[in-house]
Image (cartoon, rainbow, N blue to C red):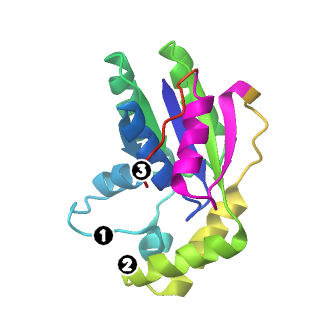
Amino acid sequence: MLIAVGGLVASGKSSVAREVARALGAEHIEADQARDEMLHIPSNQAAHEAAWLDNLAPGVTDRIYRKMLDRARSVLATQRSAVLDGCFATRSQRESARALAHECTTPFLFVECRTSRIVLEQRLRERSLASGIDELAWFPWLARVESRWEPITELSPDEYLRVDSDRALPMSVDDVLAHSCGVPPLAVSG
């Protein structure tokens, strides 16, 4: 199956995507990794969104998502599942992921990670400390994603799940596993 996990910056999407992929034995395909490869950023060098907010050329985001979908296509061709990890802020990004699943005749699920503003801002402060990037640099990136966010109206209820990622990670992961095409929920160590 193909699961796309999205949401705002610091919404918990990467943590959820990583754990869902682990639980399913699926390939975890990250937008950040695709971006770093495209921009030739060495794997041992941290490259966070906030550090290069103003350096994105037009079309880079589209190329990142195409690269992720190409990887997912290769994984799905081997009869394995894939979990995409990116913001998926626009309908076209979500529709492209769904179209790939349909092309590969595999089930599709989009998971939107939602969190309260208080938790979101706390996570951004923690990221700032961990990355060494000024705390204030994260907020323009968040505002950029928020301004581009398009309401999710294009997906049917069986293709869409919103999880409250303020809760403990295992609870969010269990929600995804329970919703994803008959996969029984598992207790995920957190």
The disc, 1 or 2, on the residue closer to the chain's N-terminal end is: 1
Q: Is residue 67 magenta?
A: no
Q: Please, what is the three-letter code of the amino acid marked with disc 2?
A: Ser
Q: Amino acid at mark 1?
A: Ala
Q: Considering only vertical position in the picture, is 133 above or below 25?
A: below
Disc 3 versus disc 1: nearer the observer:
3
Please name the residue that numbered disc 1 is placed on.
46
Q: Residues within 10 Å of mark 2 (few under 14, many from 20)?
A: some
Disc 2 secondary structure class: helix
Whether label 1 touches label 2, CB < 8 Å: yes
Quadrant containing the C terminus is bottom left
Q: Is residue 188 above or below residue 130?
A: above
Q: Nearer the viewer, residue 62 or 6?
A: 6
Depth-wise, is mark 2 or mark 3 nearer the camera? 3
Mark 1 → mark 2, Cα distance in angstroms: 8 Å
What amino acid type should be assigned to the residue bearing mark 3? Answer: Ser
Is 43 situated above or below 46?
above
Mark 2 and mark 3 lie on one chain; the one further toward the N terminus is 2
Q: At 52% across and 22% down in the image, what residue appears? A: 101
Residue 100 is at least partly visible in this image: yes
Q: Which residues are magenta?
A: 158-181
Residue toward you, 23 or 2: 23
x 67%, y 28%: residue? 159
Q: Is residue 4 above or below residue 145?
A: above
- Per the image, the residue denoted by label 3 is 189
